[in-house]
Amino acid sequence: MSKQLVLMDHDGGVDDYLATMLLMTMDCIECLGIIITPADCYVQPAVSATRKILDLIGCFDIPVAESTVRGINPFPSLYRRDSFIVDHLPILNESETIRTPLVAETGQEFMVRVLAQASEPVTLMVTGPLTTVAAALDKAPEIEAKIKQIVWMGGALNVSGNVEKSLEAGQDGSAEWNAYWDPLAAERVWQTQIGILMCPLDLTNQVPVTSELVQQLGKQRRYPLSDLAGQCYALVIPQDYYFWDVLATAYLAHPEFYQLREWETMIVTTGLSQGRTKIVSGGRKIQAMDRVDVSSFSTYILQQWAR
Ligand SMILES: [Ca+2]
């Protein structure tokens, strides 16, 4: 069976590194590259950490590209500083040199080139804002035909968003961060014919990172990937933390763990609800992950990181 072509676009949060790590363990996937969108991170340490993680896994030939897009509503620096912490974890710094290549072109240029050159349509696995995708589509609209679908961790349909009112004045709490960082980019992607599969907060809210799971990773810390995942989750366990990006990414290997549901939606781009993925009759049809078998999912990630 031929492998599914995937191009990953992540935004440098703790969760994004672990989603990358999970993607790299999937036998059914051929990863064409990894783009870092400078959203939930400071981009220099996020690019560095991503390359070091690929080195740790032994995937020295996956190109990494730095997107130079900018969002409208920046992530809090408190979240973004995690990228510096992960980049400095001892397990990622045993070697003084990084082997995984950083491409010279920007992430958005790289996305255009990879899609244009691909032998068949490619799945975009996006675990951050859609800004790099929107920029690539603006640059070369013809690549739309080369995108098989976009699997996106983002949006909140029938639950509140996660942009807290206490952190962000002037909004009503309905937006999810990846949409809120750049609502216009989400709207740009919504205007295409590309199949969109969302992993919304509606689902991720049901799959928190638990102490029990972190302890299970500890029991298998003789494996470098479990050790790194355990360290990353220990870093964020004091806050409410969920398997946002990891849950979205696991879909690629095990769609049978998930139930999907179709919705008609629009992106609110201005005002107090900007960044809201709103259900409206007659709106843009998308699929959303609706339910997941949490036990199978947990077993799967523990098994994949036992290496
Ligand atoms: Ca992310």
Image (cartoon, rainbow, N blue to C red):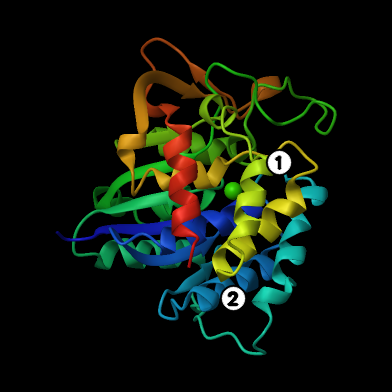
- Disc 2 marks a residue whose amino acid type is Lys
Q: Quadrant of residue 111?
A: bottom left
Q: Which mark is residue 158?
A: none
Task: Say which mark, if any, is on residue 73.
Answer: 1
Disc 1 residue type (three-letter): Asn
- Tell which residue pokes out farthest to the left in this image: 1
Which of 225/255 is in front? 225
State the image coordinates of residue 104 (x, y, percent, origin top left): 50, 79
Is 283 on the left or on the right of 202, as rendered?
left
Please report the residue visible at 51 percent of the width from the left and 30 percent of the height from the top: 200
Tell me what residue is drawn at x 65 percent, y 65 percent.
Answer: 46
Q: Position of residue 10 (x, y in %)?
A: 54, 55
Vertical order, 293 against 67 (above or below): above
Is 134 placed above or below 179 here?
below
- Residue located farthest toward the front when viewing the structure as drawn: 219
Question: What residue is disc 2 on?
Answer: 52
Secondary structure beneath dot 1 equals loop
In which image quadrant can residue 287 be found?
top left
Asked whether residue 135 is in view, the answer is: no
Query: Could you say where residue 79 lies in the image, as x and y percent from the top left?
Result: 76, 49
**1 or 2: tag closer to the N-terminus:** 2
**Which residue is nearer to you in this view: 129 or 78?**
78
Label 2: element kind? helix
209 sits left or right of 261 in the view = right
Between marks 1 and 2, how big is the CA–CA gap? 29 Å
Residue 266 visible to an observer of this rendering: yes
Q: Mark 1: is the Cβ under 8 angstroms from ligand 1? A: no
* Relative to 81, residue 238 above or below: above
Q: Residues within 10 Å of mark 1 (few under 14, many from 20)?
A: some
